[in-house]
Amino acid sequence: MSGPQRNSYDVVIVGGAMMGAAVAHFLSAHPGFDGRILVVERDPGYGQCSTAHSNSCMRLQFSSEINIRISQFAVDYVRHFRDHIGDAQAPEIHTHPFGYLYLAASEATAERLRANHRLQAALGAGTVLMSPEELAREFPFFNLEGIVLGSLGTRDEGYFDGNTIFDWWRRMARRRGVEFHHGEVTGLVRRGNRVEAAVLADGSRVGCGHVVNAAGPRAARVAAMAGLDLPVEPRRRYTFVFRAKDPLPRDLPLTVDPLGFHVRTDGANYMLGGAPEEDTAVAPDDFHLEPDIWEERFWPLLASRIPAFEAVKLISAWVGHYAYNRLDQNAIVGPHPEVENFIFVNGFSGHGLQQAPAMGRGVAELIAEGSYRTLDLSPLGYDRVAAGRPLPEAEVI
């Protein structure tokens, strides 16, 4: 494995999956930037990264304005991908707008959905609130016992082909001279308020003008190399793909169920996701799937909500990782207040793929122009971490 072609770069990006590729693409395309970029990725096959295990969904049903606006840009980006990417040969991105459906089983949760709806409607989202009677007419296959309210996204929510976007970002970045290196950053050389160099696994060093931490579930390890604390850790998330003996009569929105799972249409099949009962940090290479958890836990819950799913066949199952921000499950983006050239793009807690376009654009603006220009991402800055001041986001799946 050969080393980097140069001994110094204007920007070194640690991690080359979705976030690293987003920053590399947007920064290399920025008219105000003409520097050299190195992306260091420890797993060039991307087999263990969060991107590879993502369910690649998009929603506007958040409880905070910044997250809604981030997703609105992603909707536009996916819809007009060819124009945004700047290549007439680029494909249109496949989408499936099945929507999201949040179910509330308590009046407290219902009131939260009502408050979310007021904000979402004010920002132009197509969310509608549905009574149990309306839900029963629209989705007659649900067992709605105990459900008091639903919140359905009628547009701009569903599945999108994130892998194609990821491939094109890397392709375009390479075309503009971005160097992708198969290797691992094992240390950072910090002097005062700057990181001067990245140390690679072979002991070599590369100088850097900026370091971008795009290391996903390993982000806290990278921050610690610069003497910085980052409350981001790997947490396991399960995905199950199954086929129903009797398919539902219509597409199933991504239904966020108070029983503790979410489920949606997945082509001719269905996809269910959920978290372990003990949701704690794990090692970044821990992808253990308990052998009986589908039959003993998730399938009974699923069948209790949708009786038609009492007869299903499990097709595949896997474990991925959330890069889980313990403070507030929101992204941490931007520079460290003391180490001025260390840039975070971390802690997405499960909604990273849909936030990647806005993150790539924002970090590119920050590096090339010194500040955010299109969408102010400063509410997601590290300052709130240092102050222990969470930015609340009620709708983390």
Image (cartoon, helix red, strand yellow):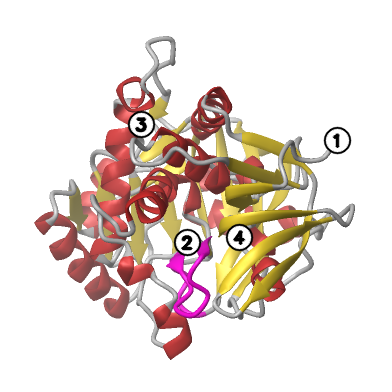
Range of the magenta residues?
327-345
Q: Quadrant of residue 94?
A: top left
* Earlier residue among tags 3 and 2: 3
- Label 2 sits on a secondary structure element that is loop
**Mark-to-mark CA distance, 2 and 4:** 10 Å
- Label 3 sits on a secondary structure element that is helix
Question: Which residue was labeled with disc 3?
Answer: 78
In the displayed structure image, the side of residue 34 where residue 139 appears, left or right: left
* Earlier residue among tags 1 and 3: 1
**Mark-to-mark CA distance, 4 and 1:** 31 Å
The answer to whether residue 344 is magenta is: yes
- Tell which tag, 4 or 1, sits nearer the viewer: 1
- Label 4 sits on a secondary structure element that is strand
Question: Which residue was labeled with disc 4?
Answer: 322
The answer to whether mark 2 and mark 4 are in CB contact below 8 A is: no
In this view, the residue in front, 83 or 188, is 188
Q: Amino acid at mark 3?
A: Val
In this view, the residue in front, 310 or 230, is 230
Question: Which residue was labeled with disc 2?
Answer: 397
Question: Which residue was labeled with disc 1?
Answer: 2
- Tell which tag, 3 or 2, sits nearer the viewer: 3
**Mark-to-mark CA distance, 1 and 3:** 35 Å
**Horizontal and vertical percent for residue 241?**
64, 39
**Mark-to-mark CA distance, 3 and 2:** 22 Å
Q: Amino acid at mark 1?
A: Ser
